[in-house]
Image: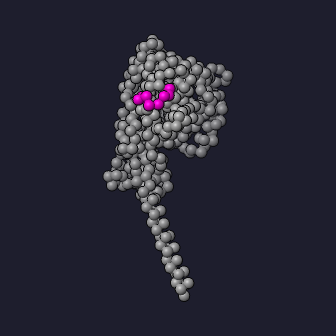
Amino acid sequence: MKHLHFCLLGAALALAGCTFLQAAGLNLDVDQARQALATGAVKATAAQLPIGLEEERAYGGAIAVKIVQKYGGLDGNAARGQYVQRVGQAVAAYSARPELDYHFGVLNSDAVQAMSAPGGYVFVTRGALLKMRNEAELAGVLAHEVAHIGAKHALGIIQNVKSRQAMSDAAADAWKGAAAFNGVIGKFLDDYLEQGLPKDTEFEADRLGTETLARVGWAPGGLRDFLQLLAAAESGGDAFYKTHPKTADRVAKLEPIVAALGSGETLEARFRAALQ
Amino acid sequence: MPILFRSHSRLRWVRRAAVASLAIASVAWAARTAYVNTRYASLRSGKASTDAIVEKLSLGQPLEVVSEDGAFLQVKLGSGKTGFVARSWTADQKPSADGFSAQLGQAARSSTSGAVSYTAGARGLSPEAEAYASSEGAGDAAQAVKKLEQTSATDAAVEAFLKEGKLGDWREVKP
């Protein structure tokens, strides 16, 4: 059971482009920098620019397509899909990046997985959904994925991949070229589809997601409880989030955070009714 | 006596300066602006989630803080309407131009701040993503993602969902 995870390096890498332009003696904001590049006023490689929203959505869309392809398409149960969308949108509305258009889908797979891609794409497998016991657990898993998007974990890595690629065209929209775009996506997927992301990004997404749970009013222990359930079933076998830190370690790190956040709603009855 | 007179005079100036400082501080405090940092937040007539909604607030909307009271802010809108909003639905920071602040996102759909040009951009798979899907033989998956994008829950449905679960803006916040 492999978990596609596309997350973290974050702000430091995202700021690489700004540093570059400042080093060139310019003091431009992102829009100004893009304009300068577009008009040829600055000789720089487009790969150094921070990734904007249009570009983020393009990369995220391509990654989302690969996720859906890998997991056999989307689950055909409309009621399940609609419920997950509502829980997901409720999470996203109170997340760090509520401005994005998020899309939540159930994958047609019995594996126990959840994953996200930049730009607002979040997926959970049918297998994971059917293992959950209440809405707080579902919200916790979705909040973990939304936190990856909010913290731009995957986007930071894509930025790094771009920077390492020899994208010689200085135009601000050089990323739109098929060769450049496919190259970045291919490299990103090769590196992170199987091996996952740095452990600290997973711990950070656990923490941020749990804080979002509490903010909205769900039981803050939702994610922790689901991880505990999985940890009990792991016993050295094929683990949930194979590419993640050990589940027990994640649970241990979440314990004091959950304890400090008080109580909330588990909404078990609504969850069961929706999944019937 | 002249010395004493000068001393009284100094005292008066000190008093005036203190009053002026307090007035300036008061004006500065009264002018504090908070910004809505969630997609679903309401200005209510009181602090309870069951109190009447005066107006629904928009992501990134600036709020003039009239007073602060624990978990709530009493705020005034540009329209002159006043009411209460949960402090946790607000942030002190103005949205960044990129709209990517970790603390506060910017209104993609209904910003009233007028301070940010950011928009959420066009919906749907980009031409680049579609071309990539085609090159990978993932046309069916691309169609599935496009369908997913077209079936997202509406704001009304999500608000009703939150209200039913007593979540978000309908959560009972302890003052």
B139 to A52, vertically: above or below: above
B62 to A65, vertically: above or below: below
B148 to B114, vertically: above or below: above
Closest to the observer: A5 or A38? Answer: A38
Render colour scheme: one colour
Quarter the N terminus of chain A occupies = top right
Q: Please provide percent x and percent y for residue B6.
A: 53, 81
Q: Residue furthest bottom?
A: B1
Closest to the observer: B84 or B64? Answer: B64
Quarter the C terminus of chain A occupies = top left
Q: Is residue B25 magenta?
A: no
Q: Which residue is painted at 55% across and 19% down in the image?
A: A187
Q: Residue furthest right?
A: A236
Q: Which residue is painted at 56% across and 23% down in the image?
A: A164
Q: Which residue is painted at 36% across and 44% down in the image?
A: B114
Q: Which residue is painted at 45% across and 37% down in the image?
A: B98
Q: Please provide percent x and percent y for residue A73.
A: 45, 17
Residue A246 is at least partly visible in this image: yes
Per the rendered image, the range of residues in magenta is A38-45
Query: Does the magenta stretch mainly form a helix, a strand or a loop?
Result: loop
Q: Please provide percent x and percent y for residue A131.
A: 54, 26
Q: Quadrant of residue A103?
A: top left
- The total of numbered circles placed on residues is 0
Q: Quadrant of residue A262?
A: top right
Q: Please provide percent x and percent y for residue B162.
A: 42, 39
Residue A126 is at least partly visible in this image: no
Closest to the observer: A119 or B141? Answer: A119
